[in-house]
């Protein structure tokens, strides 16, 4: 340990790249990247990126700085973002995009975020998929699944798994040695956000978020550090969600910060293939 940095050895050549004394941090995601739902979220699209407030991106940046590292933040997140152009088009076809209070902002990670990771990036965090699940649910309600909603759901899960792989490849094409940390999704059907949904809608949301998380979990075999929110019982506590039941509040973002910082500077337990949280409904 030197210079106050808890740098660890990279024994596995396919494992995550350790952080050094200088960290160029790129954050990919949606409204979570600005800390929306907290008591003091950052205004998006500001350069230099906002590093104040309780959001996990901002807290991780400050913790890395406090550890003795020199940190620069490139916040690529866009409120309302989804993973792919295809999902973005689906969302637009059913009435627009949810910009989390910032209007109908329509963006996707594959085109609007991942290609802009800095070539000097050493740390990339990714939290995406909740808006995608909502987009698919919205399309089903609009009749786009036709007479085979089960097949439509499986198709969307397969596409998400394919597209998250493309996202990682794009990031590595920009910065081959960046340490990549990806959060999977909780079972959104078991969060306060879904309280008013019908049982059928909850089961669709459960199937989507469990399926999307399986696609994210597969990245762990490719040197990506995956944070397992799906099987984290603590992440289903209503007290960590904001009033909309969808975004974390200050306590929720601090909890995310603890998980992300630990994964960025050390390691994370392997995501579980099964747990009770996957089959609530």
Image (spheres, grey):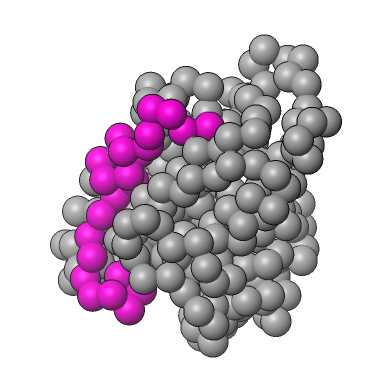
Report the front residue among 144 and 7.
7
Quadrant housing residue 49: bottom left
Q: Please state the extent of the stretch shown in magenta in the rendering.
A: 99-122
Looking at the rendered image, the quarter that the N terminus falls into is: top right
Quadrant housing residue 133: bottom left
Q: Is residue 140 magenta?
A: no
Question: Where residue 258 appears, x then y in whole percent?
Answer: 72, 57
Looking at the rendered image, the quarter that the C terminus falls into is: bottom right
Question: Where residue 54 appears, x then y in whole percent?
Answer: 58, 71
87 relative position to 237: left or right: left
Count of residue discs: 0
Whether residue 218 appears in this view of the structure is no
Report the front residue among 90 and 100.
100
Question: Where residue 106 appears, x then y in whole percent?
Answer: 22, 60
Q: Which residue is at a point 70% across and 81% down the rendered structure image?
A: 239
90 relative position to 39: left or right: left
Residue lying furthest front: 3
Whether residue 109 appears in this view of the structure is yes
Q: Main secondary structure of the magenta part?
A: loop
80 relative position to 219: left or right: left
Report the front residue among 263 and 222.
263
Question: Where residue 189 appears, x then y in whole percent?
Answer: 57, 69
């Amino acid at each position: 340990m030197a210079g106050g940095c808890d740098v660890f050895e990279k024994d596995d050549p396919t494992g995550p790249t350790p952080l050094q004394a200088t960290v160029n941090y790129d954050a990919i995601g949606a409204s979570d990247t600005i800390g929306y739902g907290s008591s003091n979220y950052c205004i998006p699209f500001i350069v230099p990126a906002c590093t104040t407030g309780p959001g996990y991106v901002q807290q991780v940046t400050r913790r890395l700085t406090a550890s003795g590292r020199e940190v620069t933040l490139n916040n690529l997140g866009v409120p309302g973002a989804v993973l792919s152009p295809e999902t973005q088009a689906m969302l637009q076809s059913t009435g627009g995009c949810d910009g989390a209070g910032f209007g109908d902002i329509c963006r996707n990670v594959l085109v609007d975020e991942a290609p802009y990771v800095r070539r000097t990036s050493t740390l990339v965090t990714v939290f995406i998929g909740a808006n995608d699940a909502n987009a698919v649910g919205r399309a089903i309600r609009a009749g786009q699944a036709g007479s085979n909603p089960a097949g439509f759901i499986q198709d969307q899960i397969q596409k998400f798994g394919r597209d998250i792989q493309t996202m990682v490849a794009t990031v590595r094409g920009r910065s081959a040695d960046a340490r990549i940390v990806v959060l999977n999704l909780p079972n959104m059907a078991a969060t306060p956000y879904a309280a008013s949904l019908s049982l059928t809608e909850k089961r669709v949301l459960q199937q989507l978020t469990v399926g999307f998380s399986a696609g994210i979990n597969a990245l762990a075999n490719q040197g990506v550090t995956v944070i397992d929110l799906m099987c984290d019982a603590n992440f289903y506590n209503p007290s960590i969600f904001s009033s909309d039941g969808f975004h974390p509040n200050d306590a929720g973002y601090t909890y995310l910060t603890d998980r992300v910082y630990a994964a960025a500077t050390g390691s994370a337990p392997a995501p579980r293939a099964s747990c009770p949280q996957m089959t609530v409904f």
